[in-house]
Image (tube, rainbow, N blue to C red):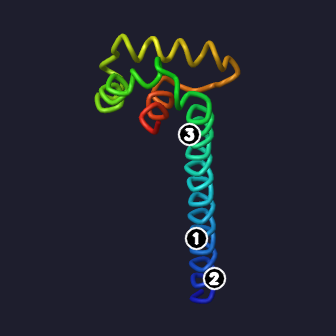
Amino acid sequence: MTALRLLTAAAVLAFATGASATSFVYTTDTTVGAFKGTSDITSDISSSFSDDKIVRAARDDAASFVASAGEVRGAQLEAALRHIRGQLPQLAASDMQLAQAILTL
């Protein structure tokens, strides 16, 4: 009976370890994927709009937007978001991602 209990405990431990490792892999893949998406957006914005007056004028509004977690939306940021989406209609980015990209300019 003791051997059966030890075997059962070993099987449960092996299963738990495998599930934990799998969870870690999924979490890591999700985090890296999100970072890569934000990095790609920042790269697209930086290369396209680094000298754009409308986008550069929105830096203070973008900082307020990011710092307030999206609660404060200034007029210059709104104009910059419309301008960016007009110039890059294929860009699928949230307002927060675009504001963060503006801050990197």
**Nearer-the-camera pick, 9 or 14:** 14
Q: Position of residue 74 (x, y in %)?
A: 33, 14
SS for callout 3: helix
Location of residue 10 by image quarter = bottom right
Q: Which residue is mark 1?
A: 17
**Nearer-the-camera pick, 53 or 101:** 53
Q: Residue at x 66, y 20 (%)?
A: 88
Residues at discs 3 and 1 in contact (Cβ within 8 Å): no
Q: Position of residue 26 (x, y in %)?
A: 62, 53
What's the distance in space between the residues labelled 3 and 2, CA to CA? 47 Å
| Amino acid type, mark 2 | Leu
**Nearer-the-camera pick, 43 or 93:** 43
| Amino acid type, mark 1 | Thr
Disc nearer the start of the sequence (3/1): 1
SS for callout 1: helix
Q: Which residue is mark 2?
A: 7
Disc nearer the start of the sequence (3/2): 2
Closer mark to the observer between disc 2 and disc 1? 1
Q: Position of residue 49 (x, y in %)?
A: 56, 27
Disc nearer the start of the sequence (2/1): 2
- Quarter of the image with the N terminus in it: bottom right
Q: Is residue 63 above or below residue 9?
A: above
Q: Position of residue 55 (x, y in %)?
A: 47, 22
What's the distance in space between the residues labelled 2 and 1, CA to CA? 15 Å
Q: Which disc, if any, is residue 38? A: 3
